[in-house]
Image (tube, rainbow, N blue to C red):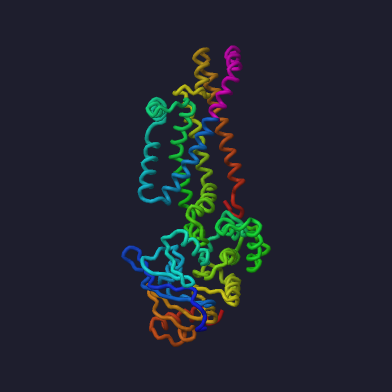
Amino acid sequence: MIESLTVLYGALPYLFRGTLVTIALVAGAMGLGLVVGVNLAVGQVYGNRWLRKAIGIYIWFFRGVPLLVLLFLFYFGLFSLLGINLSAFTVAIIVLGLITAAYQSQIFRGAILSLPEGQLKAARALGMSDRKAIVLIILPQALRLSIPGWSNEYSIVLKDSAVAYALGVMEMMARAHFVASRTYEHLPLYFSAGLIFLILTYLGTKGLRVLEEKVRIPGYSR
Amino acid sequence: MAHRKTILRIEDMTKRYGSKTVLKNASLSLKEGELKILIGPSGGGKSTLLQCVNFLVKPDKGRIWLDGEEIIHSRKKELYAYRQKVGMIFQDFNLFDHLTALQNVQIALVKVKKKTKEQARTRAINELERVGLGDHIKKYPAQLSGGQKQRVSIARALAMDPKVMLLDEPTSALDPELISEVLDVIINLRLHGMTMIMSTHQIGFASELADELVFLEDGNILETGPPKKMLSDADCERTREFCSKITELYGNSF
């Protein structure tokens, strides 16, 4: 027991550095997913038939193929075929980001569609181009409505980030496994890793709750 | 009246949804300072006509001239410039819900008309004061009553210096006791010579203020004429029927 705790104590700084890698993975992936996802959603709602079709295929692909397959496909397959030399860390962010973009796009699309049609009409009637109307009027409202769904997506991406371990990214899970397999102290290490994930989930969803409250439009009852 | 120049001319406007024609060859022209009021049963094409005028609904056929210049709506720049000159008031206000009253009026001044923030702010406050909302500029739409919302939307349209205003049943979504505060603003506009087309069921209001009433049914303009004649002695049987019914319902004055 004492020995387990000593091992764990010694490994904690190492795990914490892994936690930072995990946070960086999630932040990068969620950020990429936000940018790509918003564009996918706008394209799907307002784009022409061909754009909508293309986006449909994108979403179908990234929601349909398992994360592990996509990681290997991109890291060992696509990028080496294209002669692009990216670190496992970068590839993991890109793959996690492109997948979450597909899911996020549906959160944003639902939010956009839930806005009254009159918002766009009023913007157009004032002489705004569609681009301006979307950026100034539609998205600020749709993004507010998307926060609860986005928070859900955050907790999923956070857990998915552990799979980056398969590419050799030294995030938290990889480090826990590394120490555990050397010291045979599996229980305390995986327990700690799980606990850190739980704490990160809590902090992230809590933070988004605070944000949601902060940007809430005054006057609306809930 | 005859020598006033024509501001807006609409010719042969037609709109179909699938096989249903909701607007058939509607033609209309507006002289400077004129108020024409569209009346007729719901679903008769009033709203479609108004929305075709600023191309929020794309007509299948029809031409529009503003100040003698034809508007080609497929040229985006021209379309956006034209819409700035045509103010639109909607039945359900359509204020931007995430912006305060002030920001609602300001936003297009800054982002479309490219005024500085300061200029836009001053102008927006002036317009809001003009519609009696000087004390409410910091409120969000959800914190305003229906009548206040509609007045913000009028201020928002006026801030763009429109040459024509289109008002699509501006009081239909309001509680009865809030109607007059919006009508007062519209009367004021009329007195200041704003050129307007408005659809409404407020027949008393219409008969006292309009230069002409335009009766629309099933997408057709059945009859156009001065209010007195339209309400008491219309040529068309359907117009007479509608006008007497609506007079009975809403009363003769406002």
Please indicate whether residue B3 sits to the left or right of residue A70 in the image: right
Residue A76 appearing in the image:
yes
Q: Position of residue A188 (x, y in %)?
A: 55, 19
Residue at the farthest left position: B19
Depicted B118 relative to depicted A72: above or below: below
Image quadrant assignment for residue B240: bottom left
Q: Which residues are magenta?
A: A1-23
Please give the name of the residue rendered at 39% of the width and 65% of the height, measured from the top-left corner: B59
Q: Is residue A4 magenta?
A: yes
Residue A68 appearing in the image:
no
Please give the name of the residue rendered at 48% of the width and 80% of the height, measured from the top-left corner: B212
Q: Position of residue A177 (x, y in %)?
A: 50, 19
Please indicate whether residue A7 sits to the left or right of residue A118 in the image: right
Residue at the farthest right position: B135
Q: Is residue B211 magenta?
A: no
Please give the name of the residue rendered at 51% of the width and 36% of the height, measured from the top-left corner: A30
Q: Position of residue A128 (x, y in %)?
A: 51, 57
Please give the name of the residue rendered at 53% of the width and 69% of the height, measured from the top-left corner: B170
Residue at the farthest front position: B69
Q: Position of residue B150 (x, y in %)?
A: 57, 66
The image quadrant where one finds the C terminus of chain B is: bottom right
